[in-house]
Image (spheres, helix red, strand yellow):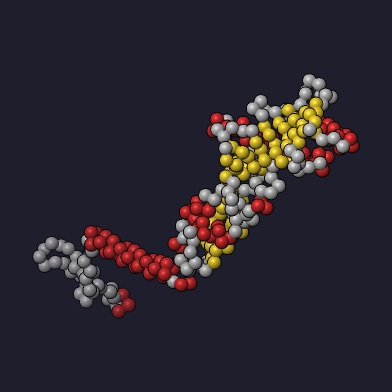
Amino acid sequence: MTPGNRRLSRPPDEFDSSGGGQRQPPSGVPAPPPAVPRWLAALRTVAGVALVIATSVGVAWVARRHIMTSPRFAITAVDVSGNEHRSADAIVAESGLAVGANVFLADIDAVQAKIAADPWIAGVTVARRLPGTILVHVTERRAAALVALGDTFLTTAEGEPFKKLEPDDPPEDIADLPLVTGLRPESLTDDHDGTTRTIRRAIDLAAEFGRSPLARRGQLEEVHVEADGSYALVVGKSAMQIVLGAPPFRRKLDQAARVVAELDRRGAKADAIMVDNDTRPDRVVVRMR
């Protein structure tokens, strides 16, 4: 055969001399590494994951230790807002927060609970502002009346008693509040909703008196509630009574104002003016001094 037609030959496959007939790798080619058992591969994977977790935990522990002990995160200020009756110092004292303590160790829920226990506080929110400030915002209750229920209590405009009157309560907070009398001490327990409605009506009556001409005659000293739900006012230093009976009160207050004006014109003094006759609304009874 010519060189151009010469067939290229390849070396024959090598066989195991043992006669098994299995093909052997060509000479000069390295044998592939033996297969890794599955259990060993799984063990290696688990070991790797464990190492990663251990490293992460260690880093987290170091980071946590840093922020819990670093002076950078010490409480430097407690900012109080929304307060009028309660001073910022009093609210901070109630909170249990201490300047210099770690800001992350402050138990926000516990701080809120402590401040909310103050009867003047209707609502409170507490938050951190890093690196070292605690923000406290309070919503205070507003007293609208004093109510005699055995002891004397401050009540909201909704008629809800919220605090016993104490000697250290600021005088400016109670000086112009109407006093509601005539209620039984146990009435709140026996009929809470009915009692708060009665107090609320007494507060509304006091406000209506303040808009009437009678307010120029003297300061309202007391709103008295009878057991049957009728109302009477005690006005001025002379403690003149104006017996109104049941609501509505606007017409009765105007009627009483006309009577007082006529008595003043005559130079007479009344001990009581009764405009509570709903059957004969035009009839007024005056008890003179």
The percent position of residue 223, horizontal first and vertical second, equals: 70, 36
48 is higher (above) or lower (below) than 250: below
Task: Pick the residue in front: 4 or 244.
Answer: 244
Q: Residue at x 23, y 59 (%)?
A: 39
The percent position of residue 121, horizontal first and vertical second, equals: 58, 50
The percent position of residue 195, horizontal first and vertical second, equals: 61, 33
The quadrant in which the C terminus is found is top right
User: Would residue 169 be found to the left or right of residue 175 on screen?
Assistant: left
13 is higher (above) or lower (below) than 114: below
The quadrant in which the N terminus is found is bottom left
Task: Pick the residue in front: 140 or 210.
Answer: 210
Q: Residue at x 28, y 74 (%)?
A: 8
Q: Residue at x 37, y 66 (%)?
A: 61
256 is higher (above) or lower (below) than 168: above
Number of marks present in the image shown = 0
User: Can you see residue 8?
Assistant: yes
Instruction: Give residue 102's quadrant in the image.
Output: bottom left
The percent position of residue 236, horizontal first and vertical second, equals: 76, 41
Q: Residue at x 83, y 24 (%)?
A: 283
